[in-house]
Amino acid sequence: TVGEIGNISLYDAAENRSSQVYLSNKYTWDNGLTWTASARYDHARGAFVYQTPMSLTYVKDNPAYNYKTINALGQRENYTGDYVQSRMSCLNAGDIDELLFTTELSKKFSRSTLRVGLNEWLYNIDYASNTTMYDQSVAADGSYPVRVYDANKRDYYFYDFNKNASEYYKGTENKLAAYLTHDWDITDKLNA
């Protein structure tokens, strides 16, 4: 739904799964003409999560900033570090239904093979790229960063939902291709 805000862990947001069904057939007539046909249906959920640094700000003893963190007991504490790093999380995910069908007639001759075929690709795509910003500590001792927030601006960690690299696409793509090929063995070492 457009405009809906939800909660999900980044681990769950990066889940990928796929279910496929594939059918194949090959038949050769007595005259050497061969017919092949194959079809595949794929229902997939593809996702990718990445995080990237956006800025590094010196905040120590600067009254313009009032960074805080929440400790393990849920209490708010002042952040005493020198730097804060702003980061963006980008959650790319999409549901894709794909149908591929290909069929080909081929005939082998003594020094060549003639092929005529048809390929059909049909995609139904529902894709979204969502972004959010957050700030984190930059520890001088190399310890793990913790999330911080600027109490002069907000009282929560995450902000600027979908203001950066966000996009949405929902639609159907259809591709149809016909082909004709002729492989000719001019000699045992030369093919055209």
Image (cartoon, helix red, strand yellow):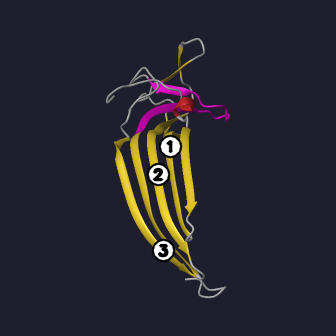
- For residue 27, which quarter of the picture? bottom right
87 is higher (above) or lower (below) than 102: above
Horizontal and vertical percent for residue 97?
A: 44, 42
* 151 or 30, nearer to the observer: 30
Which mark, by number, is residue 133? none
29 is higher (above) or lower (below) than 184: above
Horizontal and vertical percent for residue 172?
A: 35, 46
N-terminal-most mark, 1 or 3 = 1
Query: Measuring 43% from the left and 33% from the top, which residue is drawn there?
Result: 132
Quadrant containing the N terminus in the rendered view: top left
User: Would you call the spot at circle 2 few (<14 residues within 10 Å), some (14-19), or many (20 or more)?
Assistant: some
The residues tagged by marks 1 and 3 sit, at their Cα atoms, a distance apart of: 28 Å
* 147 or 184, nearer to the observer: 184
Which mark, by number, is residue 181? 3
Query: Measuring 57% from the left and 71% from the top, which residue is drawn there?
Result: 32
Residue 77 is one of the magenta-drawn residues: no
N-terminal-most mark, 2 or 3 = 2
Magenta residues, as a range?
128-150
N-terminal-most mark, 2 or 1 = 1
What residue is pinned by disc 1? Answer: 42
Horizontal and vertical percent for residue 50?
A: 52, 41
Q: Residue furthest front?
A: 30
What residue is pinned by disc 2? Answer: 100
